[in-house]
Image (cartoon, rainbow, N blue to C red):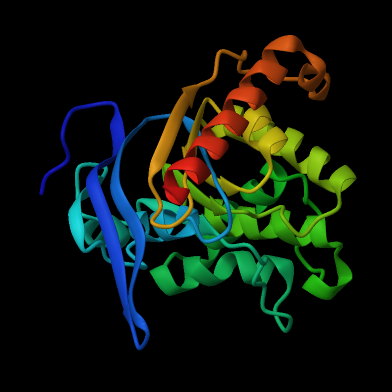
Amino acid sequence: MTQTPTSSVIQAQDLGLTFQTNDGPVHALKDVTLTINKGEFVSFIGPSGCGKTTFLRTIADLEQPTAGTLTVNGMSPSEARKARAYGYVFQAAGLYPWRTIGGNIKLPLEIMGFSKAEQKERCARVLELVELAGFEKKFPWQLSGGMQQRASIARALAFDADILLMDEPFGALDEIVRDRLNEELLKLWARTEKTIGFVTHSIPEAVYLSTKIVVMSPRPGRITDIIESPLPKERPLDIRDSQQFIDIAHRVREGLRAGYDEAAE
């Protein structure tokens, strides 16, 4: 497929995914229809096992849908992967302990065949973006958990893909560190103008970060609500005390509750 001249970056239509297991089929996703446009910050929220991560993995061609259609930059997920259309940040930082921070960031660039000079330039640039300049010679064990996650984000940014997929990257961090990284992520998004898909279990995190919030039901994962956020792009942390923020959070909770009610029927 060729890339289409549209602002749509990710397009899912009636997407479904069923895993075949020894205990019978597991219906992970059902009838998921969603458009993500260029430059949006889209969060996926729902109960554990609802298919949030599975959907992100289908975008990344780590899982293959069993129904419906999915395109990434007008291509199939497989073609998008080969075109290096996205960077992926996992729940754990996944840094190799025997490589320095700089060495970890350069690893995908080495695999892709970038020159050493280009690797050095890109590494320095992304470390500056995530506020880790000067830490390239440190090893992962010398950094805090939050700093390791920032290094993981830097690695995903190093080859400058337009799409950044993030699977609950701050879930294991304490609230204070998480708040700071949320602020830094918004600044990073504003500077890079990338399209971000973000999985979270936190309602405040989803509301604070997103231009669009996708609320999902218990398995089989379906979309119960898509909320276009009216919040301004620049968001201080204290915006969470505003009535507008509280109203959006309430709507997310209602969407989650509706998903449970439908699943129980």
Outermost residue on the front side: it is: 265
Q: Quadrant of residue 66?
A: bottom left
Comparing 31 with 44, the one in front is: 31
Position of 252 with respect to 58 (left or right) is: right
Is residue 197 in view? Answer: no
Comparing 86 with 200, the one in front is: 200
Which residue is depicted at the point 77% across and 44% down?
Answer: 131
Outermost residue on the bottom side: it is: 22
Q: Position of residue 162 (x, y in %)?
A: 41, 42
Position of 70 with respect to 178 (left or right) is: left
Position of 210 with respect to 83 (left or right) is: right
Which residue is depicted at the point 48% across and 58% down?
Answer: 53
Q: Position of residue 40 (x, y in %)?
A: 46, 29
Q: Quadrant of residue 236?
A: top right
Q: Quadrant of residue 238?
A: top right
Position of 125 with respect to 197 (left or right) is: right
Q: Is residue 74 above or below residue 218?
A: above
Q: How many numbered circles does the render carry?
A: 0
Q: Position of residue 8 (x, y in %)?
A: 28, 31
Q: Is residue 35 above or below residue 168?
A: above
Which residue is depicted at the point 57% across and 67% down?
Answer: 106
Which residue is depicted at the point 65% across and 24% down?
Answer: 250
Q: Position of residue 136 (x, y in %)?
A: 75, 63
